[in-house]
Amino acid sequence: MSSSCSQFGQPNNSPAEIADIKSAIQSVGQSSGVHPRFILAIVMQESVGCTRVWSTSYSVINPGLMQTHQGTGSCNTALAANGVVIKPGVASVPCSSSSITQMITDGVNGTPTGPGLSQLLKQAGGNDAQTFYRAARLYNSGAIPASGDLSAGGATATYASDVANKLCGFVPA
C-alpha cells in the first residue's frame, strides 16, 4: 500500500494512512462480523489500497477504497470510466482517518443505494469458502448467473478468482 497510489498519479499513502486503513478494517470488521481479511481482499481488488483512488462511473458512481455503490467516503473528487479520468478532481492529502473509516464502512455495511459485504455474505448463503467467492461476485456485479459460473459475463471475469487468490496468499510474480 505504500506505493499503491502512484498508478493513479497521486501521492502514495503515508504510514499513518496505512495504519488508519488497518484500524478501520479491524474496527468495522469486528462491529459487522465480516472477517477483516475479506475486507482487505476487496480493498486490494478495488483500489490496491490507495486512499486517493478515483471514483469510477458506470451505471452509478463508486468512490473510495472499496469503490462503494454511491458511497460518501472518498479522498479524491476525480471521476474515471474504463480507467480514464473523465472529470479531474482534487485529492485530499493526507486522507483523514474519518474519511478512511467511512470508505470501509460504506463497503462493509452498505449505502442507502447498495448493499455492502455484510449483506452480500448473507445473500450468498453458507459458511464455507464458496460463500466468500459468491459474495465477491455479488459485490462486483450485483448478481450470480443461474449457471453459478462466477466468471460469466456481467462482471469482471476474474474478480472472484482474484479475490480468492488474495485470500489464499497468492502473489503474482
Image (cartoon, rainbow, N blue to C red):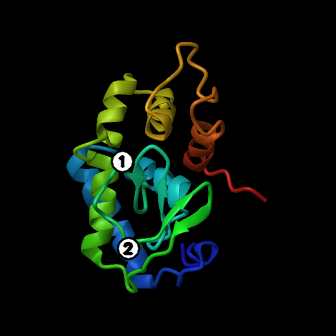
In the image, residue 13 above or below residue 132: below
Q: Mark 2 or mark 1: which comes first in sequence? A: 1
Query: Seen in the image, is 26 located left or right of residue 2?
Result: left
Q: At which x and y percent is residue 71? A: 31, 55
Q: Residue sitting at 26 percent across and 47 percent down?
A: 111
Residue of label 2: 75
Q: Residue sitting at 65 percent across and 39 percent down?
A: 158
Numbered mark located on residue 69 in the image: 1
**Looking at this view, is 151 or 1 the one in front?**
151
* Type of the residue with mark 1: His
Number of on-image labels = 2
| Tag 2 secondary structure | loop
Q: Residues within 10 Å of mark 2 (few under 14, many from 20)?
A: many
Q: Residue sitting at 51 percent across and 55 percent down?
A: 46
**Looking at this view, is 171 or 155 the one in front?**
155
| Tag 1 secondary structure | loop
Q: Residues within 10 Å of mark 1 (few under 14, many from 20)?
A: many
